[in-house]
Image (tube, helix red, strand yellow):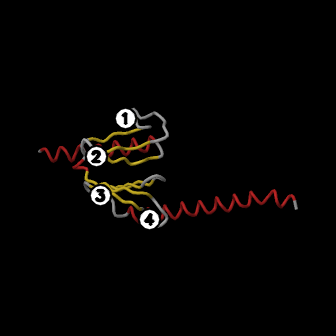
């Protein structure tokens, strides 16, 4: 009887892990369907992001698909910055670690959009890519 009681927490932990894995798989499948409409997209446990032409769409991943979706145009962006623990870090020298990693898109003096990431290298890679697209759009617009 004592042995059964000792194994019970392990059995509960196993079923909990299996359930969590199933939920994460459902989130990934919902993301995959959502991401088909974009030219480039990314999945992160904190946020999903998609780029189609000049528009960036982002939201929170769930098992039913992304929610709280917001869209903005790269043509409205004034600057793109990488923030680690609310401090601006250069995209090229992003070797720091931190708890809060975000890409910030400055739209005006008072308005900005922050998209969370789990890893600094992933945020830096996306920041460089989006900055390149943004700079191309600005060059085209100024010609």
Tell me the residue that label 2 is attached to. 111
Q: Which mark is residue 73?
A: none
Q: Is residue 135 above or below residue 25?
A: above
Q: Residues within 10 Å of mark 4 (few under 14, many from 20)?
A: some
Q: Earlier in the sequence, mark 1 or mark 3?
A: 3
Q: Earlier in the sequence, mark 2 or mark 4?
A: 4
Q: Judge depth for marks 2 and 4 and give the one in front.
A: 2
Q: Judge depth for marks 3 and 4 and give the one in front.
A: 4
The image position of residue 50, as x and y in percent, is: 35, 56
CA–CA distance between discs 1 and 2?
Answer: 16 Å
For label 1, the SS is strand
Front one among 69 and 54: 69
Image quarter in which the N terminus is found: bottom right
Q: Which mark is residue 88?
A: 1
- On the rendered structure, is 115 left or right of 141? right
Q: Residue at x 42, y 66 (%)?
A: 33
Give the farthest residue toward the left: 143
For label 4, the SS is loop
Circles 3 and 4: CB distance less than 8 Å? Answer: no
CA–CA distance between discs 3 and 4?
Answer: 18 Å
CA–CA distance between discs 3 and 2?
Answer: 22 Å
Image quarter in which the C terminus is found: top left
Q: Earlier in the sequence, mark 3 or mark 2?
A: 3
Q: Earlier in the sequence, mark 3 or mark 4?
A: 3
Q: Quadrant of residue 95?
A: top left
Tell me the residue that label 4 is attached to. 65
CA–CA distance between discs 2 and 4?
Answer: 27 Å
């Amino acid at each position: 009887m004592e042995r059964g009681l000792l194994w019970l927490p392990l059995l509960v932990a196993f079923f909990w892990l299996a359930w969590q894995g199933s939920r994460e798989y459902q989130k990934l499948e919902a993301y995959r369907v959502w991401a088909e409409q974009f030219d480039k997209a990314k999945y992160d446990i904190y946020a999903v992001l998609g780029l189609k032409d000049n528009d960036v769409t982002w939201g929170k991943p769930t098992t039913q698909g992304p929610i709280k979706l917001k869209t903005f145009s790269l043509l409205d962006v004034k600057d793109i910055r990488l923030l680690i623990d609310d401090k601006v870090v250069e995209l090229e020298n992003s070797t720091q670690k931190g708890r809060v990693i975000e890409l910030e898109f400055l739209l005006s003096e008072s308005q900005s959009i922050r998209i969370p990431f789990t890893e600094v290298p992933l945020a830096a890679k996306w920041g460089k890519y989006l900055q390149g697209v943004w700079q191309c759009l600005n060059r085209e617009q100024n010609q």
